Image (spheres, rainbow, N blue to C red):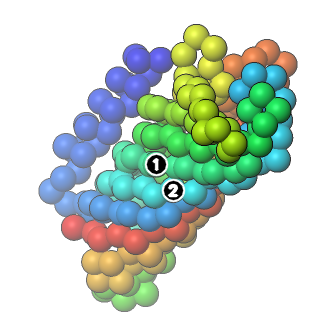
Amino acid sequence: MKKILTYIFAGVALMFAGGAQAQKLGINVGYASEYLPTYTVVERTQVTSYNMTGLFLNANYTLNFSKHWGVAIGVGGRYNMREYPSTLLTFPATTRESQWIVDVPLVAVFTVPFSDYSSVNIFCGPMVSYGITGKSTITEQMYGEHVDVSWYGSDALYRQLNIQGTAGIAIDVHRLRLFGGYSLGILSIDPRENSKINTSALYLGLGVTL
């Protein structure tokens, strides 16, 4: 796992270094809503799922091969959270969950220029995501007792590595960029055998290009 991440980040660094004189660097921030199936901590049974909401900050670098075609690679961080009613030892409770994720997309880009300063860009490709931290805090409503459960470790609820396909559209005007897209999990993040958990996410962001 660590070797895979090392190779990914080394590749990102090389791409940044190789095209820095002529290509386009983007700094982006935005909102993401992720569907992640919800499971009880003890029984591991699926319950009503609530989407996680969050924010992301990333940087990407576009290498243009022609007027219309290019490749973009990026790296960024994402924070997701959600809160929903649950139970703790049969008592009514509230569960709060949060996670920090590193995302590394590598996408093909098709560009339709409208003028010297504006264009529409359609992108699609794979994205590697890795969960840095994930936690559930279950708080019993009557007495305020709570239990903290880490998502990763020896008795993990989810796998840390997630492979996704992502696609979307970006509109560039001068140095401003507005974009949105959708990601779908290809790799199951369920650590149990004969069981699958696949994520999906919608995202919308605003960026600047340098």
Label 1 is placed on what type of residue? Tyr
Foreground of the two, 207 or 156? 156
Earlier-in-chain disc, 2 versus 1: 2
* Location of mark 1 (residue): 79
Q: Residue at x 44, y 75 (%)?
A: 178
Q: Is residue 188 left or right of residue 61?
A: right
Quadrant where the C terminus sits is bottom left
| 3D distance between C-alphas at marks 2 and 1 | 5 Å
Q: x%, y% of residue 146?
A: 59, 32
**CB of mark 2 within 8 Å of CB of mark 1?**
yes
Q: Residue at x 39, y 46 (%)?
A: 77
From this view, report whether residue 58 is shown above or below residue 95. below
Q: Hey, which residue is sitting farthest bottom in the picture?
A: 115
Quarter occupied by residue 147: top right
Q: Is residue 78 left or right of residue 188?
A: left
Say which mark, if any, is on residue 67.
none
Q: x%, y% of residue 169?
A: 54, 69
Q: x%, y% of residue 133?
A: 46, 32
Disc tally is 2
* Location of mark 2 (residue): 54
Foreground of the two, 100 or 126? 100
